[in-house]
Image (cartoon, rainbow, N blue to C red):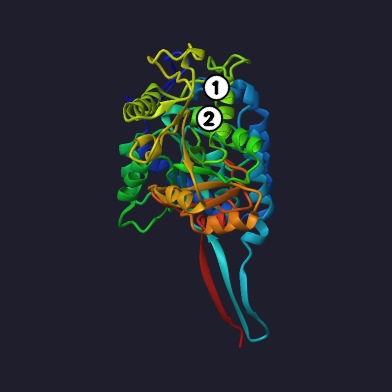
């Protein structure tokens, strides 16, 4: 039987393997889920919320083990404590707004007519989750889907095979009825076949542009809703009036945290010419203070990338940029763990870069940042928009009106002022261009996992 295999970036060893399930096996599980979902949708909302919140508490109780797991699976240092803080913030916000978000819209209510628009669960929701934040990204859809009355099927990344099992354990401990949460292990080809067969009623995918295109092709003609969050090339812009220390500290952390493997991480920075040299000098000091090493060691502040092939892609972008005239700022001799032969990659800052270089145009998804000098808002706006992606942008200034004015001219789903790399669960998470389509989080996040149904009841 074919298997899915997770190679640990710590040492290249096999960390987890699972048998690939067939189309028939998954179809059987989904059939059972459909039966369970009908009763679940009829369960009072308060009870659905209670069980979902209990599952999050159960997941929190597993966190010590999950932190170790994440280090082995995708290289995140144990010192950062995993993802449970963000998981709780997002999940509990979504449960707290559920009653209002799912309430019917009443058009008319009197002795003659009752007219309203209700929100009804779509049925079976497939969540295809990525490896970089295996719990944070998955919870964005899992929680609202279950709270809204759906059954959920989770297909996690091969790199984070055990994450779905953790979710399954948590929901079982919380008392979620059997069949409402199903964790599956399937290949890309089988995933596509299941979509072509209209096995699910909504698909939420977080991953690469190529993966999103494959999902859309597989679902074409089925009329099943698809939500796609496909990453970005998120810019930061430091205006002349910015608080320089805050800007450097936050933007560099936004570029380098999790070894740069963040969907909304900062991937390119534009700094007003009056601050450029000082910004670069401060950034160099911060980055050269990182400790690249084994993520299981408490001293490590930067672990390996999740896989050697990811590190090699970033190495290629850096090498091409240097060959084209870019200048490295970082003393790479400080990062002896980077031998160029595995997933351990030294962080890099590049200057003298431009938009002919892939490092400033293609998604890097690694610990590298290019920094360019700009002379005006207009120049910065033009460069920020010169991207195939449109997830978020970060503007650093003391002038909130200027930030809003600039933000209206930037093609992204989210605009930050004086912060970055954060998902506010009260705001919708969305994007444009090659970042994909669809919405998660906020009250709007319930729209993807429900369908509207109109009632026109004439009483007399």
Q: Residue at x 52, y 33 (%)?
A: 255
> In the image, is residue 181 above or below residue 292?
below
> In the image, is residue 61 above or below residue 232?
above
Q: Residue at x 53, y 30 (%)?
A: 256
Q: Residue at x 53, y 36 (%)?
A: 276
Residue 400 seen in render: yes
Give the Cα separation between the discs numbered 2 and 1: 8 Å
| Badge 2 or badge 1: first in the primary sequence | 2
The residue most toward the bottom is: 460
Question: Residue 240, position in %: x, y?
Answer: 59, 45
* Quadrant (top left, top right, bottom left, bottom right) of the N terminus: top left
Question: Residue 21, position in %: x, y?
Answer: 37, 33
* Quadrant (top left, top right, bottom left, bottom right) of the C terminus: bottom right
Question: Residue 227, position in %: x, y?
Answer: 44, 51
Q: Do the residues under discs 2 and 1 have CB atoms within 8 angstroms? A: yes
Callout 1 secondary element: loop
Density class for disc 2 (Cα within 10 Å; few <14, some 14-19, many ≥20) is many
Residue holding disc 1: 302
Question: Residue 215, position in %: x, y?
Answer: 35, 46
Density class for disc 1 (Cα within 10 Å; few <14, some 14-19, many ≥20) is many
Q: Residue 342's quadrant in the figure?
A: top left
Callout 2 secondary element: helix
Q: Residue 192's quadrant in the figure?
A: top left
Whether residue 27 sits left or right of residue 287 in the image: it is: left
Name the residue nearer the viewer: 453 or 457. 453
The image's mark for residue 256 is 2
């Amino acid at each position: 039987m074919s298997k899915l295999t997770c190679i640990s970036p710590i040492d290249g060893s096999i960390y987890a393997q699972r048998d690939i399930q067939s189309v028939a096996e998954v179809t059987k599980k989904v059939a059972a889920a459909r039966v369970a979902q009908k009763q679940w949708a009829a369960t009072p909302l308060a009870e659905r919320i209670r069980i979902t919140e209990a599952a999050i508490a159960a997941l929190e109780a597993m966190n010590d083990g999950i932190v170790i797991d994440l280090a082995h699976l995708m290289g995140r240092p144990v010192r950062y404590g995993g993802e449970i803080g963000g998981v709780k913030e997002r999940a509990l916000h979504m449960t707290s707004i559920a009653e209002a978000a799912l309430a019917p819209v009443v058009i008319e209510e009197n002795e003659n007519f009752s007219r309203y628009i209700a929100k009804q669960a779509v049925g079976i929701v497939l969540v295809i989750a990525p490896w970089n934040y295996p719990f944070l990204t998955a919870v964005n859809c899992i929680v609202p889907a279950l709270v809204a009355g759906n059954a959920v099927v989770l297909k996690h990344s091969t790199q984070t095979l055990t994450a779905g099992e953790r979710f399954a354990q948590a929901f079982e401990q919380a008392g979620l009825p059997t069949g409402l949460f199903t964790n599956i292990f399937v290949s890309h080809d089988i995933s596509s076949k299941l979509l072509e067969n209209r096995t699910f009623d909504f698909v939420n995918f977080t991953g690469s542009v190529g993966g999103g295109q494959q999902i859309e092709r597989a679902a074409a003609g089925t009329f099943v809703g698809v939500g796609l969050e496909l990453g970005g090339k998120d810019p930061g812009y430091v205006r002349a009036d910015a608080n320089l220390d805050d800007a450097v500290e936050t933007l560099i952390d936004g570029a380098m945290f999790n070894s740069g493997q963040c969907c909304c991480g900062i991937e390119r920075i534009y700094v007003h010419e009056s601050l450029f040299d000082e910004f670069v000098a401060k950034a160099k000091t911060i980055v050269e203070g990182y400790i690249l090493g084994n993520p299981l060691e408490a001293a490590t502040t930067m672990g390996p990338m999740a896989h050697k092939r990811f590190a090699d892609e970033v190495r290629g972008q850096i090498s091409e940029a240097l060959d084209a005239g870019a200048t490295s700022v970082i003393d790479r001799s400080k990062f002896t763990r980077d031998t160029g032969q595995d997933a351990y990659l030294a962080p890099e800052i590049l200057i003298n870069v431009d938009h002919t270089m892939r490092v400033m145009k293609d998604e890097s998804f690694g610990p590298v940042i290019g920094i360019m000098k700009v002379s005006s808002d207009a120049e910065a706006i033009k460069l920020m928009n010169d991207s195939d992606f449109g997830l978020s942008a970060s503007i650093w200034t003391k002038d909130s009106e200027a930030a809003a004015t600039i933000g209206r001219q930037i093609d992204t789903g989210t605009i930050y002022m004086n912060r970055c790399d954060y998902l506010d669960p009260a705001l919708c998470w969305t994007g444009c261009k090659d970042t994909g389509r669809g919405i998660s989080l906020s009250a709007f996040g319930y729209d993807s996992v429900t369908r509207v149904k109109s009632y026109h009841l004439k009483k007399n």
